[in-house]
Image: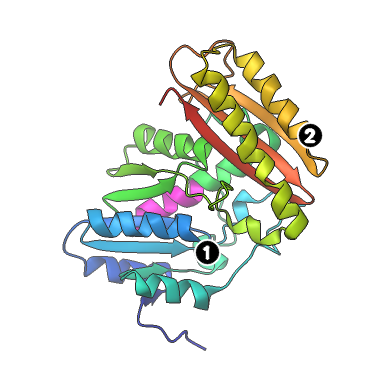
Amino acid sequence: MPLITAVRVADTIAGMRRAREEMCGTVGLVPTMGYLHEGHLSLVRRSRRDNDYTVVSIFVNPTQFGPGEDLSRYPRDISRDLGLLEKLGTDVVFSPPPEDMYYEDASSWIVVEKVTDRLEGAVRPGHFRGVATVVGKLFNIVEPHRAYFGQKDAQQVVVIQKIVADLDFNLEVVVCPTVREPDGLAMSSRNSYLDSEQRRAALVLYHSLQKAQREYSAGVRDAGRIRREMAEILQSEQLAEVDYISVASPLTMEELDTVEDQALVSLAVKIGKTRLIDNIVLGG
């Protein structure tokens, strides 16, 4: 049964291309996997300010999930999402099924080397191949002038900037600040997995990043010391299981010994079965 909404919904690639042909002016694209929160909506608002038209994609991309990850239980509520996007004046929502985005014998991928060898790329093999490929496909289908991404997924942003530069996509990547809950927790669709005790425990990510910022503001430039101070904060929370703590170059993702200019401080932590990521930039 088709969804009843005032927002134009393109549920096939052909339908999205027809909608795109009707757009005479600048187009902004906000790629999402749905279950929208204020972080996503802030990107939509920015695109609405910057462009004549705004397209939001809602697609839970199967190729960026590894074995045992949460593809089947990833939160979905398309009717709710469309209601939120209608209120913001979104022009088109592109929400195709997986079989339209990936035909059965598809075997072409976008693979970004070096910056994907570390952090999320090391912990989640194949993840960024899926991300880069689906984003490249979205760029080809929607043909936006600008595409909007949140700083919370910092390594993903670097990967997307690389494919735009290396493959000569004719668009601007706009990176917007991480949107946080009033207590500091970075907004994420996966926060919905947390029970009340886990939600409290999840604040340890933000507290450890605050510690890194305080150390830097106090003049500490030893990246190893910053990592150790963050680890101490994280180890104080019994529900937290650390995947990684990183103080790295924001351009190459290589770990730093000394923070001389800018540093991307990032971490991935499991709270129960829910894996959360967050980051800040020091010196930026």
Q: From the viewer's perspective, tell me whether residue 248 is left or right of residue 199.
A: left
Compared with 244, 51 (above or below) is below
Check disc 2: other Cα within 10 Å, few if <14, some if 14-19, many if 20+: few
| Label 1: how many Cα within 10 Å (few below 14, some 14–19, many 20+) | many
**Depth check: 113 or 87 in front?**
87
Q: Amino acid at mark 2?
A: Ser
Separation of marks 2 and 1 at Cα, in angstroms: 33 Å
Q: Is any part of residue 125 visible from this angle?
A: no
- Is label 2 or label 1 in front? 2
In front: 36, or 158? Answer: 36
Q: Secondary structure at mark 1?
A: loop
Name the image colouring. Answer: rainbow
Q: Secondary structure at mark 2?
A: loop
User: Farthest residue in the right direction?
Assistant: 238
* Residue labelled with disc 2: 236
**Visible residue check, residue 7:** yes
Asked whether residue 264 is drawn in magenta, I would say: no
For the residue pair 231 and 257, the one nearer the viewer reads as 231
- Residue receiving disc 1: 34
Give the magenta part as a residue range: 133-143
Give the residue drawn at x 52%, y 19%. Answer: 216
Quadrant showing the C terminus:
top left
Q: Amino acid at mark 1?
A: Gly
Q: Position of residue 240 (x, y in %)?
A: 77, 41
Query: What residue is at 64 percent from the left and 33 percent from the top?
Result: 208
